[in-house]
Image: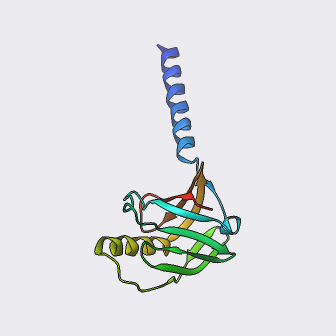
Amino acid sequence: MKNFLYVALLALALQGCAGSGAKNTAAGITPEKLVGSQWLLEDLGGAGVLDRVQATLAFPQPGQVAGNASCNRFSGPIIDNGGVLKVGPLASTRMGCAPAVNAQETRYLAALEGVERIATEGVYLLVYTKAATKPLRYTRIK
């Protein structure tokens, strides 16, 4: 009985270690390492994205982000203060959009202005924000 208890406790401890490792597979990355890259939004914090509407994120030069918010173009600063990121304020064009596209664009820009950290996981760029419980997920365009 005593051996069974030890084996059970060991199994639970190992299961806890395996679970915590799986949750932390995303590797943090600095915006400077992303300069010159462009990314296509595939998931807006667990909400998905509209079909045939491309929201993008680019890092054209150090300290700057830009892209397509769904309908309008945007750009603005990104500051890395020792691992704490701040994006914005963002400037954007003001073209008219369909209501659903406009709603997605509003959520997307709000999420970007609440960026906390950026990570990569396999082929994906993950952007963690204050506005969403799940990260924004992107695939690389360039």
The residue furthest left is 99
The quadrant of the picture occupied by the C terminus is: bottom right
Q: How is the image coloured?
A: rainbow
The residue furthest top is 1
Q: Residue at x 42, y 75 (%)?
A: 71
Q: Residue at x 49, y 30 (%)?
A: 12
Q: Which residue is drawn at 49% across and 72% down?
A: 112
Left or right of 91: which side holds 78? right
Left or right of 57: which side holds 35? right
Left or right of 114: which side holds 32? right
Image spot of residue 116 (x, y percent) = 54, 67
Q: Nearer the viewer, residue 81 or 95?
A: 95
Number of marks in the rendered image = 0
The residue furthest front is 52
Q: Nearer the viewer, residue 68 or 12?
A: 68
Up/down of 54 relative to 61, above or below? above
Q: Which residue is drawn at 55% across and 36% down?
A: 18
Image spot of residue 92 (x, y percent) = 48, 84
Image spot of residue 37 (x, y percent) = 64, 65
Q: Which of 8 and 101 is in front in this view?
A: 101
The answer to which quarter of the image holds residue 108 is bottom left
Image spot of residue 22 (x, y percent) = 54, 42
The answer to which quarter of the image holds residue 96 is bottom left
Up/down of 132 relative to 89, above or below? above
